[in-house]
Image (tube, rainbow, N blue to C red):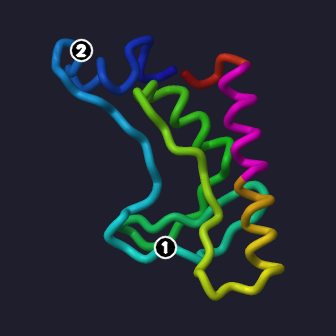
Amino acid sequence: SKLGEGGLQSFCGFEERDVTLIITLRDALQHQCDMPASDDWVTVQTLGGQKKLQVDDYLALVGSSRPHMAESLTDETMGDSSSKRTKKAVERTLAWLDRTLAARAAGRIP
């Protein structure tokens, strides 16, 4: 990985500090439900606007950053979404979780 064995904590000089690194793509202060997604990518809100993020790229980021915790990707919907949309969101979220667990089992992420 480009960050080395110590990951982001070592890169930032936090090895000897009481710091917990967590990776999440969601900003709790911004509404991000019902953003476009597919089986292979999610839309995330960035300072530069909305961007597509490939699931494999996210897993590579988690792998190279080596955080203490990382959130699996989710396809978030509004409470009043149709049952078809909600079912698809649950299926997609579970598929992404399976990919995350498989990457962990293969040693690609901590």
Assign a secondary structure to mark 1. Answer: loop
Counting the numbered discs, the total is 2
Of 13 and 25, nearer the camera is: 25
Q: Earlier in the sequence, mark 1 or mark 2?
A: 2
Mark 1 crowd level (few <14, some 14–19, many ≥20, 10 Å Cα): some
The quadrant where residue 63 appears? top right
Q: Position of residue 79 (x, y in %)?
A: 60, 81
Whether residue 51 sits left or right of residue 42 in the image: it is left
Magenta span main SS: helix
Q: Position of residue 108 (x, y in %)?
A: 64, 22
Residue at the spot x=46%, y=23% of the render?
A: 2
Q: What residue is shown with label 2?
A: 15
Q: Position of residue 84 (x, y in %)?
A: 83, 79
The label shown at residue 32 is 1
Residue at the spot x=73%, y=19% of the render?
A: 106
| Residue 101 painted magenta | yes
Image quarter where the C terminus lies is top right
Of 27 and 54, nearer the camera is: 27
The residues bearing labels 1 and 2 have C-alpha atoms spaced at a distance of 33 Å
Q: Position of residue 69 (x, y in %)?
A: 44, 33
Whether residue 95 sits left or right of residue 3 in the image: it is right
| Residue 104 painted magenta | yes
Residue at the spot x=75%, y=51% of the render?
A: 94
